[in-house]
Amino acid sequence: MAHYCTYFDSRYLSRGLALYHSLRRVSPDGRLWVLCLDDVCHETLRSLNLDGVSPVKLSDVESADPEFFSIKGSRSTLEYYFTCTPVLMSFLFNRNPDIELITYVDADIHFYKSPSFLFDAFRDSSVQIVPHRYSARNRALEKWGLYNVGWVTFRRDEAGLACLSWWRASCIEWCYDRLEGDRFADQKYLDQFPLKFSGVQIIEHPGVNVAPWNLDTGRLARSAGGELSFRGEPVIFFHFHKLRQAAPSLWQTRLGDYGATLDRATRDWLYIPYIRQLVAAEREMRALRRDEQRAQPLLRGGTRPVRALGNSIRAIAAGLRRDSIFCIA
């Protein structure tokens, strides 16, 4: 059984469900461990009772790792979430001795083809990471890290556990949402993996972690059978980084931030199908909860109507300047 883990709160539940359904299609025997970052998230996943999903309470991880919990008051919510990545993986290894391999995946990625070949190629390695593969115009972004935390695999062996232990200790010591020397959040530590530890494998397949920052390095294509490819290789998963809803039926891809364009193939084969899944997931959760006060809409609330309208108008204007907004029914 392939073991994956991720984390998200109730505001990100629709993306988490889209991740789950895509993973279930390509890896039906896999298990997805979800660290639920608030109670609504945990209650919803428990109620959905999805095959292959194991919800984990944040309080359980905090109780098992007092050192992690001790830094909660010194980090912003986002920074505490960043710190969770290696902490969760360590927790799962400690609690589940049958897990030999565990892969962390970001909640905003979407699978199109089985990643099983990555595990086949991983047989003689202990750690697996994926480079951002920034395009030439985005090369300056390497300062945030050469590798992306969107996919990280560890093996339960001496080298794998040593690397994971170092990453966890480093994040507990320092994990902030700013660039400081050779550190940024949980991500820039990955630059040190191949330098400090043996058995680190770097994924070179161009279809793994296709993302806004490397989308302009090739072209998407689709076979007669519907299989997506990028730069001549199958798309394993796409990273929907920065996708946001600006207003009802209007979505901001932020592709323009990276010099990529929302061409017809990108829109019709990637973004529109994914957004439809997010909307369907949101409807599923609202029907389940039957409580509009607890529902977490994709268009985030919490501000006064006039202010929310102003924010939407500004987001739409900015997106139009970047050619990053489109309409979907």
Image (spheres, rainbow, N blue to C red):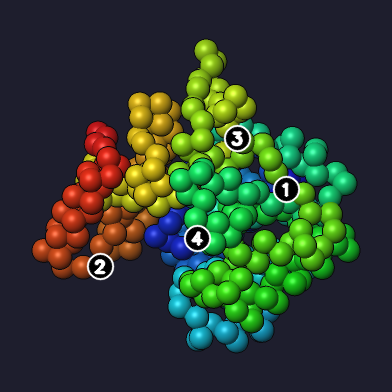
Q: Amino acid at mark 1?
A: Ile
Please name the residue shown 74% across and 35% down the image.
Answer: 117
Q: Is residue 137 visible?
A: yes
Mark earlier in primary sequence (4, 1): 4
Mark 2 vs mark 3, foreground winner is: 3
Residue 113 in picture, x, y percent from top left? 61, 32
Mark earlier in primary sequence (2, 1): 1
**Tag 4 secondary structure:** strand
Mark earlier in primary sequence (4, 3): 4
Q: Compared to 157, does 262 lie above or below?
A: above
In the rendered image, which residue does mark 3 sit on?
Answer: 207
Q: Amino acid at mark 2?
A: Gly
Q: Is residue 284 visible?
A: no
In the rendered image, which residue does mark 4 sit on?
Answer: 8
Please name the residue shown 23% across and 45% down the image.
Answer: 321
In this view, the residue in front, 256 or 310, is: 256
Which label was assigned to residue 302? Answer: 2
Quadrant in which residue 305 is drawn: bottom left
Q: Amino acid at mark 3?
A: Gly
Please name the residue shown 64% across and 81% down the image.
Answer: 173
Residue 159 in picture, x, y percent from top left? 85, 62
Mark earlier in primary sequence (2, 3): 3
Cα separation, mark 4 vs mark 3, equals 25 Å
